Amino acid sequence: MPERVGLLKYMQYDSAQKKEEPLKKAEEAEAGLEEGDEEEEGGEEEVEVEFKGLPYFCPENYEPGSLLSVEYDGKNNLAFARLYDPKNKRLFCWYDNTNHHPYCYSDLDEEKLRSIKKLVTHKGFLGLEEVEKYDLLSDKPKKMTKILATDPLAIGGTSNSIREILPKAWEARIRYHDNFIFDKDLIPGLSYRIEKGNIVSTPFEIPSSLKKELELSLGKAPEFEDVLNEFLPLFLTPVPDIKRAALDIEVHSPIRDRIPDSSTAENQVICVSLVSNENENTIFLLKRKDVETGDKPKNFPKDAKIEYFENEAQMLTRVFKAMSDYPIIVTFNGDNFDLRYLYNRAIKLSIKHEEIPIVLTREFAYVSTSIHIDLYRFFHNRSIQVYAFSDRYKEETLDAVAKALLNVGKISLDKSIHELPLFDLAYYCWWDSYVTLRLTQFDDNLVMKLIILLMRISRLSMEDLTRQGVSSWIKNLFYYEHRLRNYLIPLPEDINRIKGIGETKAIIKDKKFRGAIVVEPEAGVHFDVAVLDFASLYPSIIKEYNLSYETVRCPHNECRTNIVPETNHWVCKKRKGITSIIIGFLRDIRIKWFKPKSKSSTLKEEERKWNSIIERALKVYLNASYGVFGNEPFPFYCLPVAESTAAIGRYAIQQAITKAKSLRMNILYGDTDSVFIKNPPEKAITELRNWTKQELRVDLETDKYFRFVVFSTRKKNYLGVFKDGTVDIKGLTGKKRNTPQFAQQAFRKMVETISRVQSVEDFERAKNEIQEIAKTCYNKIKNKEFSLEEFAFRVMLSKSLSSYYKTTPQHVKAARQLSKNGKELKPGDIISFVKVRGKDGVRPVELASKEEIDTDKYKEYLKSTFDQILDSLGISFDRIVGITKLESWMSG
DNA sequence: GCGGACTGCTTACCT
DNA sequence: ACAGGTAAGCAGTCCGCG
């Protein structure tokens, strides 16, 4: 079985690494690393390097495949890569044979460094090498000395690491495996082959016709030439469908409402399922004396293979073996639950360390024979949620995500897990794995393709990409771009010292700088409203106004006159900023190429979809590109950059509004990058567009056109109806997730009525209907005709119960009542509660009864929900429900 | 001791 | 661990009135 060679070696690596885990933990503690500090993997312990001399561990008849990860082998002191072989559908490894070593830089010369005893006698010290780097902060070349070390921990991660010895160390906090990726120009997610022991990228030729077409679309931009060649292979290389299985476990849990504790793993694992994208459905079931087998549920998968076990340890051992058949293991919350539980349970059952292919760190769980993707972490990522999936799921549970994206939910149970007949248990467990797998498959493997694409752009391993946030993705991309150009990666403290702090005052307390403008809306109903907006405003500004950490407040005197409005910041006129180039390029190629291609009717459906995935991936980077500069943990943090971006944004919208008014247009509303204009003449729009393009260097586009818009006096609140009757609702209470269902229903009915309105005259009819809706709902509250569920507010617990000490919001009050009843609650849980008469004023739905409902509170709530719309229609809620001022005082 | 004015906290939203 | 701006409801505090 030659194709298993790589894997066997790999297994060996991991069991070795695992033993060093406690050592590594201790060292971290000793070094006093702050949370979130870069972890260096591997142990410090010196070991013989048995793999040296053997160039790679790759099956003989493999096929070149996708690079999925680069990691560090602490036992053998080598970086290694894991790749997917599409022919054998297995992972194989390549070990570094290039003599690459961990390093960092110092600005001291070799002689001075040699005089530092602690450095040259450090047991990890390897040698020095003088190099020249380009320092963007001073805009000058800089002589640096590269300090090479035997292992990552010698550079950083312990209290006597080299970076602690030096007065100042550059690039010493980049994790070694990332360094390796940059230096070897490896791109995770692209295809590589092993040639005479070396890892070689598959060459990518850009068809010349395509290149011409691209140049035509993007326009002539010499600074983009190299970037285009660099990025095109990432966008255009197809993504293989990688063999994978989803895993889910069920645990015996006698106490209701208690989630089994994965760190103690006290209870039996009673079922495990693996569902693969090659139609394998394997269910591992523990036979228990007291539990009946039952009948197979209707939709039980016909081809499912059930393996029964008398002994739990044997079952787990079998599961571990089965897992190794899959290059990728997918879970939903496996980092914190399934894999953690399996590992700790296996230890508890005295299974040997080296027979458990799971490696735990404080936060994560890895599978040594596979790549582990925890979909919970991926879907939890705000950027993915908002930009890739347009906020379609609002909670990050398997049930909520699956309902939103697949239109299927979890199976609801009428008894506890441990009481289920075996077949019901098997089905329940299988279903969760099946749904988890499908989350990676729907829409032509959208999620897997998105992950691979994001890996390519960020230069991150699959396991890192799916666990880190957009800030990390951008950080890694920028690191790579610096390395590629031989730029010295600046120290955050140097950027801070040179660039200083913000100059503008935020409107919100405790914020660091002023943000966008929101124009006061013109309350009322307005027919024929055009919405114009700046296409990708902030990225456009970063590109057009040359914003970057080195170009804002640059070192040149002659640039000091180039001032950002409302600030004293100036911008470089001499060189293009690196951020400006990269963000500018990504913006242009998204807007001018991938966005139109994703809608192009001349392309095949499949191609359109791929272009749309690229377009969405780029959007994620672009939308975060300004925010990261105002976020301190970002290593290129530079307040003047974020502040200048926002300031120019304010300038742009103000100028555009002034110009529009001078063209006699009626501005109804605007927010950040948009303006709502009442019935604008086509000619005036064209003139405004030309003017903004010319004078402000940003594109103003017609985004949408409303038949009419209803504004109240509130900002970020409106209801618009398009020509075709579709409705666009922003910010209104009736649409919020935490609004009780009864109010959402009534609100929906009101919206339906409004959406049927064609003309000014129709409104009168609509007003009557709306009054009826409000009245009906009001009476149903009065008579308590809604169920407790319909009365319930659903509010998310954003932190642990004990950390609410400043105030006790209502959902926390309700949660504490539940908690007293023995229910375990954690951050992210949704609390359903109703308002009741009596001292607390609230009660969780589970404990409430209808009698205690506080109808007055609900009447008030209905009023405020409806008033957001009624205000602008000139209707009084109180009049509708037929109460006079006096009556409303007396009711109760 | 009470109630209104005020501030602060929290969540959910918009761009 | 991307940013700031806005709405809404409630919790908690302060202060003046009687």
Image (tube, coloured by chain):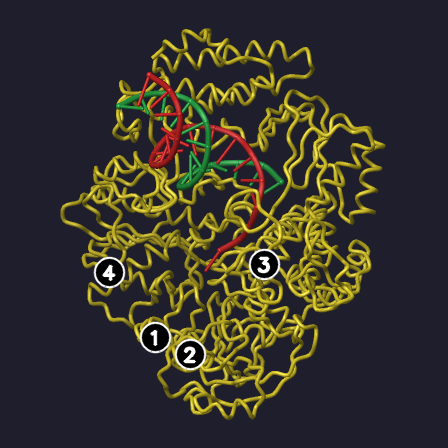
Chain colours: A yellow, B green, C red
The residues tagged by marks 2 and 1 sit, at their Cα atoms, a distance apart of: 9 Å
Sooner in the amino-acid sequence: mark 2 or mark 4: 2
Q: What residue type is labelled 3?
A: Ile
Sooner in the amino-acid sequence: mark 1 or mark 3: 1
Query: SS at mark 1?
Result: helix
- The residue that appears at 24% across and 71% down in the rendered structure is A352
Residue A310, image x, y percentages: 18, 57
Q: Do labels 4 and 3 share a chain?
A: yes
Q: Mark 4 lies on which chain?
A: A
In this figure, which residue is indicated by the disc labeled 2?
A153
Q: Which chain carries label 3?
A: A
Do callouts 2 and 1 mark residues in contact (Cβ within 8 Å)?
Answer: yes
- The residue that appears at 65% across and 59% down in the rendered structure is A235
Q: Residue A495 shows which numbered tag? A: none
Q: Viewer-nearest of labels 2 and 3?
A: 3
Sooner in the amino-acid sequence: mark 4 or mark 3: 4
In this figure, which residue is indicated by the disc labeled 3?
A501
Classify A584 as above or below A873.
below
Toward the viewer: A640 or A92? A640
In this figure, which residue is indicated by the disc labeled 4?
A345
